[in-house]
Amino acid sequence: MTQSALVTGISGQDGAYLAKLLLGKGYEVYGLLPRRATDTLWRLRELGVERDVRLIDGDVTDLSSLIRAIEQSKAGEIYNLAAQSFVGTSWRQPLLTTQVSGVGAANVLEAVRLVSPTSRFYQASTSEMFGLVQAERQDESTPFYPRSPYGVAKLYAHWMTVNYRESFGLHASSGILFNHESPLRGIEFVTRKVTDAVARIKTGRQKELRLGNIDAQRDWGFAGDYVQAMWLMLQQANGDDYVIATGRTTTVRDMCSIAFSHVGLNYKDHVVLDPELLRPAEVDVLLGNPDKARQALGWTASTRLDQLITMMVDADMRRVDKA
Ligand code: NAP
Ligand code: GDD
């Protein structure tokens, strides 16, 4: 029998890669799509799967729409990727972030419990929950210390996932994913902001790139690798929590250097530090320990940061050439 999966956040970076992965495995893929005034399907289109996914009108802040989506899709696997996912915005819209990224996950868990308690559930948790890190390399047992309203909202969603697993026996897994990027990354995130600027500067469309804290360090991987880990978690006998990371960390400064030098430029000639872009509280460094995922899921990150960033610069060069 054909398996079906329901993905919230299907129009986002990970939603698009996950939809493509699941379709390739023969799933019927349903996506929960919140009503927006503009077209949000460009990522699905770029991956050539826009016509293959079945979209259901709904929103994670609206429980009845989630109940309808689960009933309609009859999904055996439910991936909750929906979020207000930009950390910077979470200080300016803390309550919306709480509703979507925190309570939204509780709504999906409730809908699963009420309608389809044997379905398997994935929660998109995050390394932002480690925030002010309490260990040099963060793993599943590292204490959390979120530093943004987004991180706090995600920590609530994470513990609700654990709680529904323990209280109701749901097959519920929390993937604690470290930063992952791709040519489909939103332009507000630092890697894509940099690779887009590199393409514009190289082609004479932009002069400078304004950045905030370029000493911040992140454990960056490729989104295409990370959605495989999501799927693997739901294929296990029981739900669990897993750190998904590369195990390497790099400064924003060094990531810029890789991006600019790929097209023969020096980042020092173009990057301007802008105090307006500093955050009220910063996550200085993230470095994940993915040993559990390697041992239990057989998963490892297969794309190096230089490969990822050059892939993103090349995609942005093609985009600006076409524009
Ligand atoms: P993204 O590109 O920002 O996608 C977020 C998705 O959520 C979009 O499709 C968005 O739709 C949807 N959404 C927002 N509000 C919604 C609502 N009220 N109801 C239903 N859908 C809603 O994020 P991503 O990078 O793909 O990340 C996927 C998930 O993983 C997110 O939960 C994120 O917090 C988490 N995560 C990401 C990373 C990372 O490095 N990428 C790391 C750890 C965890 P619209 O665009 O129409 O608003
Ligand atoms: N966005 C942005 N823009 N970040 C900048 C800039 C800038 O101009 N200048 C410096 N940075 C620094 C930020 O201060 C942060 O330390 C780092 O670059 C990465 O910022 P983002 O790319 O915005 O990602 P993030 O780490 O805050 O959050 C992402 O990763 C989380 C997982 O750790 C998001 O995808 C979250 O949704 C995800 O949970």
Image: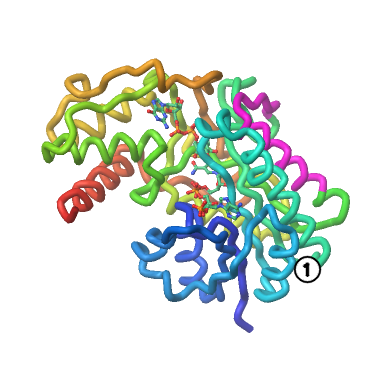
Horizontally, residue 308 falls left or right of residue 32, namely left
Residue lying at 25% horizontally and 50% vertically, measured from the top left: 315
Residue lying at 65% horizontally and 74% vertically, measured from the top left: 73
Vertical arrangement, residue 161 with respect to residue 197, above or below: below
The amino acid type found where label 1 is placed reads Ser
Single out the residue that lies furthest toward the front: 37
Horizontally, residue 52 falls left or right of residue 6, namely left
Residues 117 and 59: in front is 59
Residue 169 image position (x, y, % from top left): 84, 56
Residues 76 and 194: in front is 194
Q: Is residue 118 magenta?
A: no
**Helix, strand or loop at mark 1:** loop
| Residue 236 placement: quadrant | bottom right
Few, some or many residues within 10 Å of mark 1 (<14, 14–19, 20+)? some
Residue 48 image position (x, y, % from top left): 36, 69
Q: Is residue 156 magenta?
A: yes
Dominant secondary structure (helix, strand or loop) of the stretch shown in magenta: helix
Horizontally, residue 190 falls left or right of residue 12, namely left
Vertical arrangement, residue 117 with respect to residue 178, above or below: below
Residue lying at 47% horizontally and 58% vertically, measured from the top left: 37
Residue 52 image position (x, y, % from top left): 46, 75
Residue 40 image position (x, y, % from top left): 44, 59
- Quadrant of the drawing holding the N terminus: bottom right
Q: Which residues are magenta?
A: 142-163
Residue lying at 33% horizontally and 36% vertically, measured from the top left: 193
Q: Which residue is mark 1?
A: 116
